[in-house]
Structures are given as C-alpha cells and as structure tokens.
Image: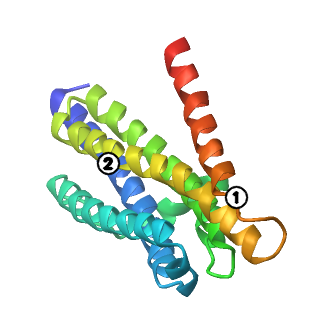
Amino acid sequence: MNTNKQDTNKQEMISKHVRDMLAVENEMHAAFRRQKKDDRLSKLPRAASVVSEIEDTIDRHLEALRGCLSRYGAGESTLKQAVGSVLGAAAGIYNGMRSDEPVSRMLRDDYIALSTAVVCYEMLHVTALAAGEQKTADLALEHLKEYAPLVIAITETLPHALVEEMGREGKLNIDHQAAERAVRNTKAAWMDQAVAG
C-alpha cells in the first residue's frame, strides 16, 4: 500500500473516531442541559454544582472536537448514525437521564455517562497514538483527564443526595455520617485496587 493511501486511511479512521466522540459528547450535553434546569437540584447545591461543572466541561470539549474534526476535513453530518454505532446498549442511558428521576438516580446515570465518555476517549487516544496523530492523542487524553475528577465528584456527591432524598421521603433519618462513610469506603475500594495493581 502506498504512503498516500495509508495517510488517507489513517485520516479517515481518526476522523471517524473523532465524530464518534463528538456524538457521545453531543448526547451528553443535551442530557446535562436538561438536568441543569431541574428545580430539584437547587435543594442539593453540591449536586447542582457538579452537574453545572460537567455541562461547562462538555461545552469546551464540543468546541475542541469540532476544531479537531475540521483539521481532518470532515464534518458532523453523520452524528446521529455515529451515536447508535458508538454507544450501543449504553445509548439508552442518555435517554434515561430524565428529569422525573430522583437526583440520586440522575447522578448514577451521570456516572455511567461519564464512564462511557472516558472509555471512548481512551479508545480515541490509543487510536491516535497508533496512527501517529499526536495532537489528537493529546486532545483525547486531556479530555479524559478532565472527566476523571468529575467522576470522583459524582461518587462523593451521590451518597449525600441519596440520604437527603430518603430523609425527605420519611424512609430513613438523614444520616450524613452514613454518606461520608460510604464515600470513604468507596475511595478505599478504589485505592486498594490501585495499590494492588
């Protein structure tokens, strides 16, 4: 295969991965924008802050991905098709991020959505590295790194949202100590794996 054909194939492959990533971010953006407008978040300022920060991060990512895509001479015309192909079974999560769910369930779905984005960015990163596209590889890694602390923020926020909701519904007493303990236990579980690895 000649070098020009290889270069063209690499560019097409990378632009497809960037379009897929743009599709993921677009779907998440719509879901987080709906959540941000949810009145129930005002009762849980910590959750509201995390959701707002995620939406702001997605805004930056969308702009950067569009710029990246234009460097490859590609457009966004196939985004709808890309959503189905890249998300598969996870696509329903974005539709499931509805405003009629309790905030704790919203946060659960947010965690799943961000985890999907993180693994998609990892795929874009490795593909770009293998293709010798360092600028795109760096962009994917930067975006992955920006989501990592937001995933952690969700794991620290969700237990507090859940105990607040159960307390308001009269199911259990509001026990912030239980929420803090759950946060510590979850962190310890991840740290144990990091140390073991």
Instruction: Tell which residue pokes out farthest to the right in this image.
Output: 171
Residue located at (57% from left, 21% from top): 193
Nearer-N-terminus badge (2/1) = 2
Residue type at mark 2?
A: Glu
Reply above or below: 113 against 31. Answer: above
Q: Which residue is mark 2?
A: 146
Going by the image, does 50 lie left or right of 180?
left
Residue type at mark 1?
A: Asp
Q: Which residue is mark 1?
A: 175
User: What secondary structure is marked by label 2?
Assistant: helix
Q: Position of residue 71 (x, y in %)?
A: 15, 54
Residue located at (29% from left, 39% from top): 141
**Callout in the foreground (2, 1):** 1
Examine the image and state in which quarter residue 50 appears: bottom left
**How many numbered discs?**
2
Reply above or below: 152 against 54. Answer: above
Q: Position of residue 178 (x, y in %)?
A: 69, 49
